[in-house]
């Protein structure tokens, strides 16, 4: 009897110990992303600075866009996105991988050789209506934006000219680092973008809008806004999704995506009709950081700083009732 009691006590202690161990184990889904710290001597040779960056697969370190001019075009995705784990994506089409050593060498080049973090100015564009290259750099927990455009059309200081040339070399270094093999980029998460069009291609078959979750008119108004009245022309098109970025984007469910891809023959752009009207639809693959942040990285014309497009996951709101 004593022996059975001792065995029972031992089993109870073992179970309690296992429960305590389970409680003390962190949930991988909620683990804080690892921070990698790199230290090196600055270009002056006199000081050492610690550079930190998030090594997560969804953490953007470097991102570039091209556009912003008054007569520019819409970029549905960034030119380059480089993530903390070394993954890089070109547009939303091609994907490659940098080794840890190559990524750290690139960051070393940007920070130490070209001194991006110590620049007095970050915007080099003195003709605001022309396109420029926009660089988003996230280091030490801070995002910085650099603009490289037409510069030197007015008298500039020698320091500004020097920093302008260093920024150009930094942008070249980013491009040169992406020399490895690439493969097509794919994403299971897709955003819907839609706009009303007044010039559909009637030489092609135009399918009817197949989704019952919301109307295509709802989607177009949510994405691009209500069309303003045009009293001089039957064509009331706006610049949204032609050269201006949209107001919002809509995350598609798996079932919605499969239905639309079937009608679009697996293309990412096409035309649908609904209620006698026509709409251009875009299926935009999400980049790794966009679903967690619920924001699409896009850049349009007449834009002088980067601001993402909000991504809706859920019910598309009804079309606003016109105010009297």
Image (cartoon, helix red, strand yellow):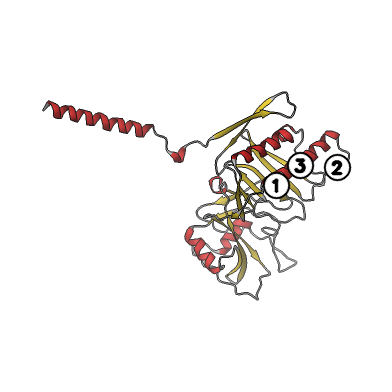
Position of the C terminus by quadrant: bottom right
Q: Of the two numbered discs 1 and 3 on the same chain, state the one appearing first in sequence.
A: 3
Numbered tag placed on residue 175 in the rendering: 1
* Residue 150 appears left or right of 259: right
Query: Which secondary structure lies at badge 3?
Result: helix
Cα separation between marks 3 and 2: 17 Å
Cα separation between marks 2 and 1: 24 Å
What residue would you read off at disc 3? 169
Whether residue 22 is visible to the viewer of this picture, yes or no, is yes
Q: Residues within 10 Å of mark 2 (few under 14, many from 20)?
A: some
Instruction: From this view, report whether residue 36 is shown above or below residue 295.
Output: above
Numbered tag placed on residue 30 in the rendering: none
Q: Of the two numbered discs 2 and 1 on the same chain, state the one appearing first in sequence.
A: 2
Instruction: From this view, report whether residue 234 is shown above or below residue 63.
Output: below
Cα separation between marks 1 and 3: 10 Å
Which residue is nearer to you in this view: 33 or 260? 33
Query: Which secondary structure lies at badge 1?
Result: helix
Mark 3 or mark 2: which is in front?
A: 3
Which residue is nearer to you in this view: 73 or 309? 73
Q: Residue at x 70, y 37 (%)?
A: 109
Instruction: From this view, report whether residue 128 is shown above or below residue 280.
Output: above
Numbered tag placed on residue 152 in the rendering: 2
> Which residue is situated farthest in the left direction here?
1
Residue 94: x and y, percent?
62, 54
Q: Of the two numbered discs 3 and 2 on the same chain, state the one appearing first in sequence.
A: 2
Q: Do labels 2 and 1 touch, CB within 8 Å?
A: no
């Amino acid at each position: 009897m004593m022996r059975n009691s001792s065995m029972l006590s031992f089993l109870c202690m073992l179970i309690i110990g296992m429960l305590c161990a389970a409680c003390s184990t962190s949930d991988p889904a909620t683990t804080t992303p690892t921070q990698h710290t790199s230290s090196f001597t600055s270009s002056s040779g006199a000081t050492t600075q610690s550079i930190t960056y998030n090594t997560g697969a969804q953490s953007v370190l470097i991102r570039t866009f091209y556009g912003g001019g008054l007569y520019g075009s819409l970029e549905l995705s960034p030119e380059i996105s480089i993530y903390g784990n070394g993954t890089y994506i070109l547009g939303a089409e091609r994907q490659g991988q940098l080794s840890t050593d190559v990524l750290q060498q690139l960051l070393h080049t940007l920070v130490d050789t070209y001194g991006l973090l110590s620049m007095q100015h970050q915007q080099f564009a003195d003709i605001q209506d022309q396109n420029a290259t926009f660089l988003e750099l996230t280091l030490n927990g801070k995002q910085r934006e650099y603009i490289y455009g037409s510069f030197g059309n007015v008298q500039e200081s020698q320091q500004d000219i020097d920093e302008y040339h260093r920024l150009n070399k930094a942008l070249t270094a980013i491009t040169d680092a992406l020399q490895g093999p690439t493969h097509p980029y794919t994403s299971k998460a897709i955003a819907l973008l839609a706009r009303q069009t007044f010039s559909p291609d009637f030489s092609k078959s135009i399918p009817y809008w197949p989704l019952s979750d919301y109307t295509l008119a709802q989607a177009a108004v949510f994405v691009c806004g209500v069309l303003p009245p045009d009293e001089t022309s039957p064509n009331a098109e706006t610049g949204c999704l032609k050269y201006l970025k949209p107001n919002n984007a809509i995350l598609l469910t798996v079932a919605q995506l499969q239905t639309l891809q079937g009608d679009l023959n697996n293309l990412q752009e096409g035309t649908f009709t609904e209620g006698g009207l026509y709409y251009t639809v875009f299926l935009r693959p999400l980049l790794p950081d966009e679903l967690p942040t619920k924001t699409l990285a896009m850049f349009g014309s007449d834009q002088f700083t980067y601001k993402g497009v909000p991504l809706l996951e859920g019910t598309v709101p009804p079309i606003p009732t016109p105010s009297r």
